[in-house]
Amino acid sequence: MNKGTLSILVFALVVVMAAVATPVSETVTSATQPVVVTDMIGRNVEVVPGSYHRVVCIGAGALRMYTYIGDVQDLCGVEDIDNIKLQNRPKMFDSAARPYVIAYSEEFSKLPSCGVGGPQAQAAEAEKILACNPDIVISEYEDVQKEDALQQQLGVPVITLRSGANGVFADEFKGSMRLLGSIFGKEARAEELVAFVEKETAEIIRRTADIPESSKPAVYICGLGNWGTTNHLMTAQNYKPFEVANIRNAVTGLSAKGIQAIEKEKFESIGQDVDIMFIDSAAVKNIKPLYAQDPALFDSCKAWQNGEVYLQPAYNAYYTNYEIALINTWFDAKTVYPQLFEDINIYVKMDEITQAFLGLPLGDEILRFGNGALKKIDTATFFN
């Protein structure tokens, strides 16, 4: 056998061995096989994981959640509310930080409209979505029949996400992250984010777990966004950041759960028991004119009298700001229990959290909204 023939045989053997070691055809086939996933409202939808590169997100919170997991470069349309370069669009959240918009406003501004969006938009705009030519739609419209009808009309998968009442701490949020990960081939990224949230939550709980009830000050949270910005009477007796941080909520006895308005009389009745007050920064613009009309607005509140009033970034702005909800939990815990969190620099923590969610340290940009936030306010001058 001459050297040329021997070389050809060796080369052929190497090719055969490589083919056996790495079944390329099987890998490609398995990667393109459709599978059925169950979305967050129980719909079974057939998808081809990792194959989607023209994505549209519709409804409150859908685009925000997608940016945590998916590739923004794959978006082919955006709701008007998230395109801050448009003049004619819903602007009720412009005074509040939305970190995903801060991070990707330039990318969003180059995309066509897939609908108006915003709290007043309670239905998907199918014609605008079709004009964007998506190959998948990520939705936060949680109506099974309407989602099925939209999917049939569009001819592409419509996947519905869900946050859950407890926001970033909810099982539904983690499930939505994992669902996005499985659809877009980003399972490792989804698990990384879920693990980060669980680790942060566990650390806050660990630090505050042994505080006796008698040592807990009464704390009032107000101004929480609910279908838009609100005022000092909008609160929640089951405010999850307080529950995670073992903070005693000053509000009790409400008939319903969730964010809701209380009567002026209720606010005044609990006022002398409120040791610390947190104001959501998105509500400042609404409270200021009320305070101008009635400078005695907060006089019944002990925290206001004692200067124990703090401003925190907007919890909700076109649904929950998940990374800000986690930031606020650290801030609330550090404010209420300073000795237990004296090693925590809240501004460093803020950047750490936005880095984990969006890949960028966005603390400075967030604090440019809503009168700064993450600070004690001067009750004698703040609303003047």
Image (tube, grey):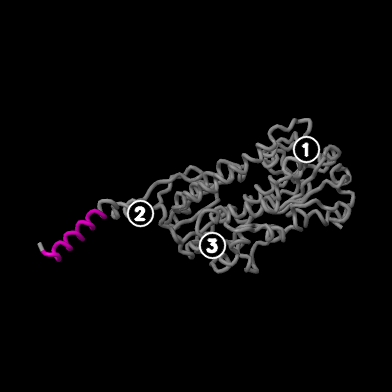
Q: Give the amino acid at mark 2.
A: Thr
Is residue 169 shown in magenta? no
The residue drawn where x is 36% and y is 53% is: 31
Q: Give the amino acid at mark 1.
A: Ala
Residues in magenta, as a range: 2-18
Give the prevailing secondary structure in the magenta stretch: helix
Q: Which quadrant of the figure has residue 264?
A: top right
Q: Tell us which disc is closer to us: 1 or 3.
A: 1
Q: Which mark is residue 250?
A: 1
Q: x, y (%) of residue 84? A: 63, 65
Can residue 101 be seen in this snapshot? yes
Q: x, y (%) of residue 13? A: 20, 56
Q: In terms of depth relative to the viewer, which is nearer, 3 or 194?
A: 3
Q: Give the amino acid at mark 3.
A: Cys
Q: In terms of depth relative to the viewer, which is nearer, 346 or 145?
A: 346
Q: Which mark is residue 32?
A: 2
Can residue 147 be seen in this snapshot? no
Q: In terms of depth relative to the viewer, which is nearer, 346 or 189?
A: 346
155 sits to left or right of 64: left
Q: Which mark is residue 114?
A: 3
